[in-house]
Amino acid sequence: MTATEPHPLDVALADEFSTLLVGIQRLVRRHLRHTSDEPRLRGAQAELLRLVRDTPGLRVSEAADELCLAGNSVSTLVNQLVALNLLRRGSDPADRRAALLYATPEAVERIEAWRRRRRALMGDIVTGLPPAEREALAAALPALRQVADGLRTAPAPGTGQSTHQPAGRCAAQGER
């Protein structure tokens, strides 16, 4: 093993951690889907909706760059979400040809309801843990934040560029 090769225990930890994260997300979504009467949104639709809610007035091209999707794919998602009354388009005063995106009040409430249900579900699960496990989970939060920060700033494979770059980062990475 050289200085640049990860230790086998670190590789095993990273693999188990990644597998657990994916499994936890899937189980949370499965539980929450059964507590909602609303039509289910596809992953890309929900991701776009959260992005627009958090960044009102976003252009379609900016959303495409942020989500690493082709502009026409985002336009299709926008049309679907407009038809569901979850997004609205506004015109850009600086460029009448460009559309600015806004989450509707219905969308904001839907996102907030999902977050409330997720918080309640996870709160019940965490509360049900033995005290030592709750303490271990709380102690792990700083490390989990560092993992998230590392993912935001890690160089994209083969580019040497951070994965958290301004507009245009996806095209250079061939992810569209």
Image (cartoon, grey):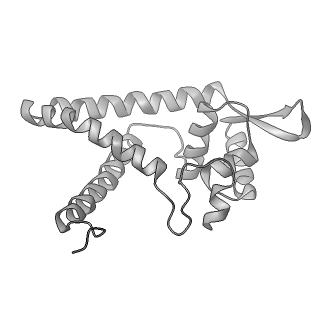
Question: At which x and y percent is residue 26?
Answer: 35, 52
**What residue is drawn where x is 43% and y is 31%?**
115
The quadrant of the image that shows the N terminus is bottom left
Assign the C terminus to one quadrant of the image.
bottom right
Q: Position of residue 32 (x, y in %)?
A: 38, 40
**Is 29 displayed left or right of 139 in the figure?**
right
The percent position of residue 103, horizontal first and vertical second, equals 66, 31
- Which quadrant of the structure image shows residue 114? top left
Q: Is residue 76 left or right of residue 13?
A: right
Q: Nearer the viewer, residue 149 or 39?
A: 149
> At x 67% / y 40%, what residue is drawn?
84
Q: Quadrant of residue 15?
A: bottom left
Considering every residue shown, the one lying at the far right of the view is: 96
Given residues 94 and 51, the one toward you in this image is 94
Residue 52 visible, this angle: yes
The residue that appears at 64% across and 36% down in the rendered structure is 52
Let me know if residue 31 appears in the view: no
Residue at the front extreme, as displayed: 3
Q: How many marks?
A: 0
In the picture shown, does residue 85 fall above or below 15?
Answer: above
**x, y (%) of residue 25?**
35, 48
- Report the residue at 38% width, 42% height from top: 34
